[in-house]
Image: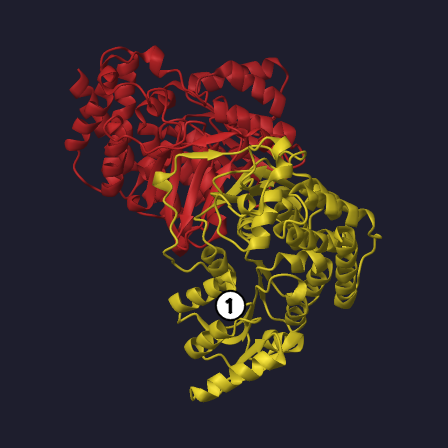
Chain colours: A yellow, B red
């Protein structure tokens, strides 16, 4: 029985994780939940799953939840709050596995703390790896803690990497749907609206990640994530556009064999993989291979998707440049969604922020967070 | 340094194996060679590779080779002949790895003897597995001898199986090019000529295997081979038609993940994999993934390809039915190539031979060979 800490329990990954717990009650139980502000959902989850500890964003929200639990006659659930609360969630002695699915850098400290406490981590939060991957992977190596990627691409790579050694890997090929503008004439990119950009062809996801898919910055973040997770330089990571999102990624070996992972586009599959690794429990998440007809691939167009080029450049520099890439993008996407800048302004903003970012390699989470704040300040100033 | 026995050294797999030895002189050397009647080629190979022992089909050929070696002043090469000679080739103390690539059942005894002698085997001869797979795999398990498949499909499966346990495998998916008649109207099958059937769309191979590709009997033999090699029932093996022969096969796991292997269509790759396993040496056999555009799949049409249906039926019965399937096909293909029966007569002959074959499970190689002879007699009688 694995007792789980679910960081980001009310988000899409958190809810999918709970649906896996529901399907495999003999394998998993919920030890702790960390969420932000969605108190109704956290209350329902607490009633259903009876965790030992719940953490919310603020002291006020924590008090509200405590009151509601008390009113309902539910006892035995400790309620805490803030970053410190999330850290308690991820490090308690009764936690066997941490699902890190808080969006953005706010899950960073709790994820780092979990690794230091020797807890295996299922990582759905790519910003953690992009901003602090060097620190997290060094800690994971030191404490011999496995980090299981919950991104569908990195999860696919993790599977394909079981077929050879690290030294035998030639190239990690991340597949990309190419987003909704793969075939849009390039002169129309300036006039793309938020409504158009929020329509993703294959995955239903949050707003920022959907826009990041449309700019392919998301794939760029995944390139950086792959470099950190799998300890390879960016020259060993390539992107191929695969509109059907059926092949989730591939690994090319030095002997010439390429291994590819195929499955349904359902995040419960990588979550189950991460939770159960190295085992594979039987699931109903079946891909109908008999119905498969075509798989298409094409090379990504770096002119159409400058964010992807910027990400490869940031990956090569590492440290503050990866942090700034992620932070500047978050600020720029917000500005785009508020119609303050055009679609093409996202890449422009990132490029300018990167140009103003000194190269450095933060050695602590505090330094990472400082570099993140600094990049956001530069981005906000540029967009003001 | 692995010292190789190459059974079938003058055939296509044998020659490809020697080209791998040429490329990796620090890894492999030739200990013994077994061939049939191509004395010029065996002589050239002996001069080039200086094996300790060479075996030829007959005493007369062996004497000829000995004389030519003597004339050329080459000493230190023992020359033997016949089945006994091939067995010596595959079992000598100075052999570390046996490449079993003699076409047909004639390589069977030497392959069995190699396993009994504890030699790891790279198996390119699918008839061995079809006719005597139950005996060979039982011996391999008992003596803890790895059998590494050199068929591109089974080699792909072997790779994909490294990503989970045997109990986690749901279905082995063998890909098939579909041969040249995948889209031919079914009423024209009767008038297919040997010339048409000998044109394979993606692989250059021997005559029988090319015809077997056109009838898809070859894929049927591979289904049986997969059942034996990977210890699964035929219900866990499926075939998908994939005209590009780029995905060499796939394994579907019970959790929903499917692993696929992609590579160039070059037999040197599975040979290298088998020789080097569990390592992967760097090779120049690179697949250009950046140039990949489309992969197509379709379901095999059992009406168009009755041989495939017959193979699944034989796989379910095992034993003599698998032996008879292979033997009857070899006789029928010969008759087709000699224009004695139409293309559709191949399946008809096999079906009739199977109907006349009693179900039994030979326990020895001698019994296997007897069942093989019996099936050939029935087939010849039918075609007389």
Q: Quadrant of residue B373?
A: top left
Horizontal side of residue A357 vs B30, given as left or right: right
Q: Residue at x 48, y 23 (%)?
A: B12
Rendered image quadrant of residue B238: top left
Decide if residue B282 is on the left or right side of residue B125.
Answer: right
Q: Position of residue A38 (x, y in %)?
A: 52, 71
Seen in the picture, residue B67 relative to B172 is either above or below; the reply is above
Q: Quadrant of residue A236?
A: top right
Instruction: Classify the position of the C terminus of chain A by image quarter.
Output: bottom right
Judge left or right: residue A82 versus residue B200: right
- Residue A72 locus on image (x, y percent): 42, 86
Number of numbered labels in the structure image:
1
Determine the secondary structure under disc 1.
loop
Pinpoint residue B295: horizontal percent, then vertical percent.
46, 32
**Pointer 1 residue:** A10
Residue A183 appears in the figure: yes
Residue B266, compared with residue A281, is above or below; it is above
Q: Nearer the viewer, residue B258 or A68?
A: A68
At x 73%, y 43%, the residue is: A348
Q: Is residue B341 above or below residue B164?
A: above
In the orientation shown, which residue stands out farthest toward the left? B356
Measured as percent of width and height from the top left, residue B80 is found at 47, 26
Q: Is residue B247 left or right of residue A252?
A: left
Any part of residue B361 in sight: no
| Observer-nearest of B227 and A5 | A5
> Which chain's residue wears label 1?
A
Query: Which residue does the image show at 46% across and 35% down from the upper left?
Result: A295
Vertical side of A149 occupied by B338: above or below: above
- Which class describes the residues within 10 Å of circle 1: few (<14), some (14-19), or many (20+)? many
Question: Is A101 in front, or is B383?
Answer: A101
């Amino acid at each position: 029985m694995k007792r789980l800490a679910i960081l980001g329990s009310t988000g899409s990954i958190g809810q999918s994780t709970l649906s896996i717990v529901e399907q495999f009650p003999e394998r998993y139980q919920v030890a702790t939940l960390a969420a932000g502000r969605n108190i109704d959902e956290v209350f329902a989850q607490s009633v259903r799953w009876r965790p030992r500890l719940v953490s919310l964003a603020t002291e006020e929200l924590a008090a509200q939840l405590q009151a509601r639990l008390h009113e309902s006659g539910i006892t035995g659930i400790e309620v805490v709050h803030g970053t410190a609360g999330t850290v308690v969630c991820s490090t308690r002695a009764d936690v066997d596995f941490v699902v890190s699915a808080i969006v953005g850098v706010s899950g960073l400290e709790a994820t780092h703390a979990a690794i230091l406490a020797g807890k295996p981590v299922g990582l759905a939060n790519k910003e953690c790896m992009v901003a602090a991957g060097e620190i997290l992977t060094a800690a994971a190596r030191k404490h011999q803690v496995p980090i299981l990627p919950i991104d569908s691409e990195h999860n696919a790579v993790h599977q394909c990497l079981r077929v050879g050694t690290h030294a035998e890997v030639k190239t990690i090929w991340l597949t990309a749907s190419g987003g909704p503008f793969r075939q849009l004439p390039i002169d129309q990119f300036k006039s793309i609206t938020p409504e158009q950009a929020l329509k993703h062809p294959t995955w239903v996801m949050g707003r920022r990640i959907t826009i990041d898919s449309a700019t392919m910055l998301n794939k760029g973040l995944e390139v950086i994530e792959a470099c950190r997770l799998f300890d390879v330089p960016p020259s060993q990571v390539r992107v191929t556009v695969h509109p059907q999102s059926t092949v989730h990624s591939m690994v090319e070996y030095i002997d010439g064999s390429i291994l590819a992972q195929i499955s349904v586009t359902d995040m419960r599959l990588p979550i189950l993989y991460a939770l159960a690794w190295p085992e594979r429990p039987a699931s109903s998440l079946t891909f109908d291979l008999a119905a498969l007809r075509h798989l298409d691939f094409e090379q990504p167009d770096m002119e159409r998707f400058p964010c992807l080029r910027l990400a490869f450049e940031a990956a090569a520099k590492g440290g503050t440049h990866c942090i700034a890439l992620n932070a500047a993008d978050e600020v720029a996407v917000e500005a785009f969604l508020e119609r303050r800048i055009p679609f093409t302004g996202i890449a422009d903003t990132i490029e300018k922020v990167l140009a103003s970012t000194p190269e450095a390699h933060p050695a602590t989470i505090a330094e990472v967070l400082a570099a993140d704040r600094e990049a956001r300040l530069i981005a906000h100033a540029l967009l003001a």
